[in-house]
Amino acid sequence: MADNASLLARREQAVPRGVASSTAVFADRAENAELWDVEGRRFVDFAGGIAVLNTGHRHPKVMAAVQAQLERFTHTAFQVCPYESYVALSEKLNALAPFSGPAKTLLLTTGAEATENAVKVARAATGRSAVIAFTGGFHGRTLLASAMTGKTTPYKRRFGPMPGEVFHAPFPTGLNGNTVERTLEAIQYLFAADVEPERVAAFIVEPVQGEGGFHVAPPAFLEALRALADQHGILLIADEVQAGFARTGKMFGIENSGVEPDLVCVAKSLAGGFPLAGLIGRAPLMDALDPGGLGGTYGGSPIGCAAALAVLEVIEEDGLCARAAAIGQRMRTRVEGFAAAGLPVANIRGLGAMFGFDVTNAAGETDGAMAKAVTVAALERGLILLSCGTKGETIRVLVPLTASDELIDEGLDLVEQALATVAGKVMA
């Protein structure tokens, strides 16, 4: 059997440099919140495929649903021969939509498709062209999604020119003077200097930033966005690709604020590891496009729909929203203990089990190189852990919500050891 080193050599010859991997661990098998590589080494998984595995690797209910669908058919293209599972999943997502009134759902394949189709719907429904996004936001790697993403390297560098009519305001992280008030002032500057509000189709915002550093959008900020949107006839798009499906302690992250969006982008944990995405929107908006204006060959695949229907059952039956809240509190208590013990931890934050913190250097400054060193030290100890943030300074935890307390504690022990090693401390 191939080992990690030989597979890495083959990867470097066969796969473009632009496709980055956080580790050189080649997966062989996985179960719930554990993964084994091709050399038989076991890892605790605190990455969850970047928030794809809220219900864990190979959840039995999801696997059974997929197996049953495989016995029937794998593809027809919904635009050619529709099938009940697409309709049934749309009905369930419409019922879960975090806004009042009738909803409709478009099923797709990737998160970038969801965000781009949200803009298409917003433009068609409003007759306007401009979009306002926020610094640090991540909305995908296709060209319009990259334009909306609020980080140049590596998502925009050398890919220009970017699509026009996309503007950015600072996201109110609460750090370095990035307050709600400053963000609202910046939006007014945009209205005065760059784009009149009557030309803006939508605001697009993550209720909790993913790649941008797990910063939670303050409720006051979302409330103000909603008020501005209502004042000027602008739509509010919630990008729930990473925050959705119980991760934050609610089905959708924006529900923690009480603010109702007009359009909701979903993907990642919707289908338990199978490619599926969607756009949930107010019915009149979703019906603004002509037949054929929405869709995609693989959008809402039968396999993905079967998996997603099972995922939604698991979330409800296993109480994963409440479980996410409990996991988040467990992690917060433990990491606050790391900080109290003098480990290089700062700015602990998150909602539910969408949890992160910054790593600092000897000067007390947040440090991307230090955070990367922590993920490397964790991997050496058997923990898959990711960093994020505008400068890579944040450790993010996306452990499956189905993980046991014992496994979560094991992973947190490894985080502590990695922090202590990088800080040059000796564990007691």
Image (spheres, rainbow, N blue to C red):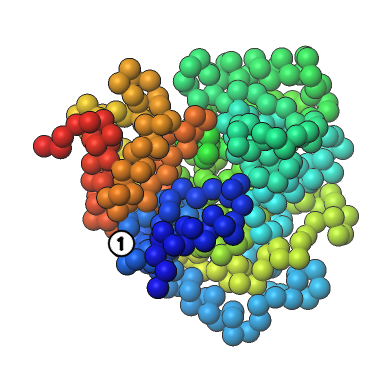
Query: In percent of the image, x 80 and y 56: which residue is there?
Result: 294
What residue do we see at 68% from left, 39% from top? 146
Q: Is residue 153 visible from the viewing direction of this image?
A: yes
Q: Is residue 119 left or right of residue 50?
A: right
Q: Position of residue 32 (x, y in %)?
A: 37, 64
Q: Which corner quadrant holds the C terminus?
A: top left
The N terminus lies in which quarter of the figure? bottom left
Type of amino acid at the residue the image marks with label 1: Arg
Tell me if 391 is positioned left or right of 229 in this view: left
For residue 332, which quarter of the picture?
top left
- Measured from the top left, where is residue 414 in percent x and y? 26, 46
Residue at the left extreme, as displayed: 428
- Mark 1 highlights which residue? 42
Please give the count of numbered marks on the rendered protein.
Answer: 1
Task: Determine the secondary structure under disc 1.
Answer: strand
Determine the residue positioned at 43% across, 54% down: 24
Can I make out residue 230 in this image?
no
